[in-house]
Image: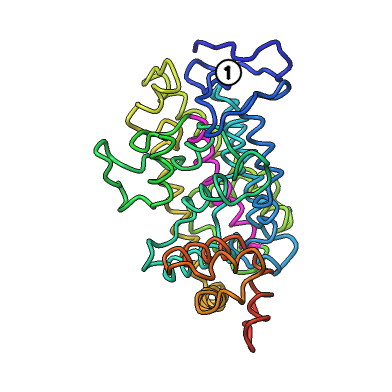
Amino acid sequence: MEEQGGLAGIGFGYRPRAAYACDPAQSRGRFTDEPESRTRTPFQRDRDRIIHSTAFRRLKHKTQVFIAHEGDHYRTRLTHSIEVAQIARALARALLADEDLAEAIALVHDFGHTPFGHTGEDALDACMRPWGGFDHNAQALRVVTALEKRYAAFDGLNLTWETLEGLVKHNGPLTDATGRGLKGPVPATIVHFNELFDLGLSQHASLEAQCAAIADDIAYNAHDIDDGLRSGLLSLPMLEEVSLVRAILGTVRAEYPHLDPVRTAHELVRRQITAMVEDVIATSRRRLEEAAPKSADDVRAAGRTIVGFSDAMAADEKALKTFLYANLYRNTEVMAEREKADRVVRDLFAAYMADPATMPEGWREVLARAEDRVKARHVADFLAGMTDTYALKEHRRLFDHTPDLG
């Protein structure tokens, strides 16, 4: 595979990259022009802005599966994002892609998530249905292009085109060549921003974005098992229903027949991650040889996802997801907590829409004379930015009874 020099030799921590990787020296730039950093590549600068943002810190208290304050050892959106970033970097390194871009996309990919995980998103989407609905991917774009207020020269984080493309399209193209949405209408936030800064919605994203996307799947498949075992909702005997897990557990027990259940679980999780990562690397290298892309644009125009599982691993991963949905995500205890969280989000939305004066200073002034469509979107922005703990605090402030979550 041909390598490109990029910013080699000028203090940027250069690593070899293939010709099909995104080259920071050839970035398509930022929405608002800025002088380049003298010590960091554009993608390293994106990563640093993401890490220092308010939205990143809030991920610490946002639910992954279990309500954030249920226990100190459960994943939150923050720890999940860090784990995704580690796997994304490993994949990018093995595939000679740009590690910093893959890491940046992984770290920012959950910025649009509401409090209380997918429950909060579903509730807010239902509340926003008369005004276009709510989509966490589109909300992440709002956060990094408008809602973060840190810099004197612009709103948002002013990330590079490549990071924004990866954020919006890491799970694949959003439209066909005619602009028609592939999975229904494209959220208005993405459509409007795309008119100003064309992200190529009908094409696949870069190899780096694809690394971040598959790293997300690998991380939550493995770590939801870990959290499920820790919670007691899953057990090792239950997990033997899943062929991939059964095979790994068999190997662990053959090598360590007297290992305690806690260490057995840790061995299972780490070996599952290794198996999935190695499968993705081997499969993606084969697809790269077949597609023979000569540039990052060739990857975007390939007409298929290049970074992914083999057919056998994809089948195993699908079976694992089916198991987790049935036994963890839809577990009666988890669903009971979801019902409480759903009520909190719906109550808060209704309260703020009915009386914007109940919102904090800086928000209520904007909404005082706004039409319902604008008011609803701002209320959604406020709610989506909340942590689990702040949402519960707000509910206690506004209502006589707040559900006891966790």
Left or right: residue 144 versus residue 68 is left
Main SS class of the magenta portion in the image: helix
| The magenta stretch spans residue 214 | yes
Mark yes or no: residue 335 visible.
yes
**Residue 39 quadrant:** top right
Where is residue 257 drawn, in percent x and y?
Answer: 69, 51
Front-most of 205 and 397? 397
**Residue 386 quadrant:** bottom right
The chosen color scheme is rainbow
Mark yes or no: residue 333 visible.
no
- Picture layout, residue 124 above or below residue 287: below
Front-most of 369 and 73? 369
Judging from the image, what secondary structure is the residue with disc 1 in?
A: helix
Left or right: residue 205 versus residue 108 is left
Q: Which residue is mark 1?
A: 25
Q: Which residues are magenta?
A: 207-229
| The magenta stretch spans residue 175 | no
